[in-house]
Image (tube, grey):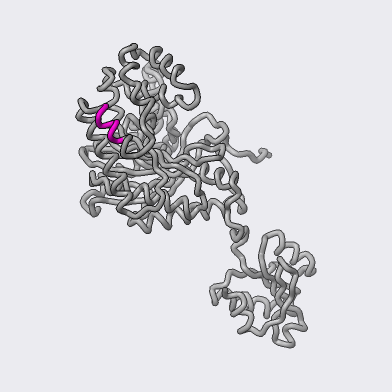
Amino acid sequence: MSKPSLARGTRDFGPEIMVKRTFIFDQIKKVYQKYGFLPLETPAIENLSVLMGKYGEEGDQLLFKILNSGDFAKDITSNDLESGSKEILRKISEKGLKYDLTVPFARYVVMNRHQLAMPFKRFQIQPVWRADRPQKGRYREFYQCDADVVGTESLICEAEIVTMLHEIFEHLGISDFVIKINNRKILSGITETIGAKGKEVDLCVAIDKLDKIGKEKVEEELLQRGFDVENIFKLQTLFSLPSTQSEMFATLKYWLKDSEIGILGVQELEEIWILVDKMQLKNPKIAFDPSLARGLSYYTGAIFEVKALNVSIGSISGGGRYDNLTGTFGMPGLSGVGISLGVDRIYDVMEELGIFPEALQLSSTKVMVTNFGEETLGKSLETVAILRQQGINSEIYPENSKIKKQFEYADKKNIPFVIILGSDEIEKEVYLVKNMKSGEQNTFTLNQLIESLDV
C-alpha cells in the first residue's frame, strides 16, 4: 500500500483557500470583461514544436515533456544514445505541458487569424507548469491571469492597462501599490547615449540594486560588467532625475536628445501619462522606473511591473509591449501588449493585510434541512427541492442522526441556517429555522421561509 503524497512543487487547495482564490479570480475576470477582453482557453498539452525555442535554452530545460504513448523507447538506436539527450527527446516525446499562456495564445492567433476581429482582446486564466526547483513562493504548477491586445500599436491599450490594474486592485481591496513603467526604447537610448550600445541588460541588472546597495556600489558593479569610467560619468543624469513628472520627462528628452530611439521611448511614456489623465483616473499610482528591465528578450516598448507596498511580497503583476508575438509561427509584425497577474502573490498580499471580505463563506450552502428518518424524510426532501427550485443553495443531511450531530455538521461546514423538520413542525405545517451564528430560532410558513432566505 503506497503512502499518499503530493508531487513536489504542487499543492492542494482546500475549500477555505478556494473560496478566497475564487474571489480573486472573479474580481479579475469581472474587470477584464468590463474592458472588452474575451475569454480564451488553450489545452494543457501543446506540441513541443510549438513550445521549444520560445523561452531560451533555460526555458527549454524547464518544460515538462510528456513521453509518447506505448513503447516510447522503441525507436531509439545506439547512435541516438551516443548523440545525446536532444536526439533521444525527439524520438520519445512529441508533447509537453504549457510553460506560460503567451506562446499558446500566439499559436491560437495564427491558427485563427482569419476569424478573429483585429485588434483581438483576450483574457486567459489557467494553470501553467514549469519543471523548476521548488522553493518558497515558486511552484511547478501555478495559475496565470493574462490579458492581451494584439493587432494594434495604439498606446490607448497601455493606458487602459494602467486604468484596468487600478480597478482590479480596488476591487480586491489592495490600495497601497505602485505601477512602475519603463520603455525598452528608453533603455536602448540610455546605452546609446553613454556609449555602451546593446548593454541594456547589464546596465539594468546593476541599477536595479540602487536602493539596496547605493550609487557607489552600483558603479563598481558596472565597471565589473565591462562599462568604462566615461560610460559611468555620462550615466550620472540617471541617478538624479527630478521627481515631478514634467521635469522628469524634460530632463530625459534633453539627456537622450541624440538618440532617436530614446526620444521615441520618452514620447511614448509621455503619451501614456496624458491618455491615463484623459481617462479620468483619480490619483494614478504610476511611476517611471528606469531600472525596470523585465522581459528584455521580447518586450519592445512599454514595460510594466506592479508592486504592493508595505508588505513582504514584491511584484504582483507584470507585462509590456511586444512587436513580434506571432513571428515564430510565420505571421510577423503583429504588435501587442499585455499583462499577467500573479494570483498566488496577490493571495499572499491579501492574507498578510487581512483584507479578504468577511462575507466570504466557506460553504456555498445557505441552508441545510434536517433528516430524522422515514417519518419526516418525505417532507425534508420536498422542502429541499422547493428551496432549490427557488434558487436557494440547499442540502439535506443524508443520514438519520441525532440533531446535535446534524448541527455539528452544519456548523463545521459554515452553513448559516438549518431547517428543523420534526413531526411537530410537519403536523403544524411550519418550518423551524435556526440561525447557526446567533443561535436564534424562528418559525415560518413556507412563503415566509422562502422570503427570509431569498435575500
Q: How many marks?
A: 0
Q: Is residue 119 above or below residue 374?
A: above
Q: Is residue 254 above or below residue 433?
A: above
Q: Is residue 285 above or below residue 249?
A: below
User: Is most of the magenta stretch helix, strand or loop?
Assistant: helix
Q: Residue at x 27, y 35 (%)?
A: 266
Residue 242: x and y in percent read 36, 32
Residue 169: x and y in percent read 47, 50
Q: Residue at x 49, y 30 (%)?
A: 132
Quadrant in the rendering for residue 103? top left
Q: Nearer the viewer, residue 12 or 151?
A: 151
Query: Which residue, as the protein is rendered here, is positioned at the far bottom?
Result: 428
Q: Point out the stretch of residues depicted in magenta.
A: 249-255
Q: Quadrant of the N terminus?
A: top right
Side (left or right) of 320 relative to 350: left
Residue 331: x and y in percent read 21, 40
Q: Nearer the viewer, residue 93 or 261?
A: 261
Side (left or right) of 392 relative to 342: right
Quadrant in the rendering for residue 416? bottom right
Quadrant in the rendering for residue 359? bottom right
Q: Residue at x 23, y 32 (%)?
A: 263
Q: Nearer the viewer, residue 356 or 207?
A: 207
Regarding residue 328, the answer to whether it shows in the image is no
Side (left or right) of 343 relative to 328: right
Regarding residue 312, the answer to whether it shows in the image is yes
Q: Quadrant of the C terminus?
A: bottom right
Residue 56: x and y in percent read 36, 27
Question: Is residue 399 found inside the magenta-colored segment of the image?
Answer: no
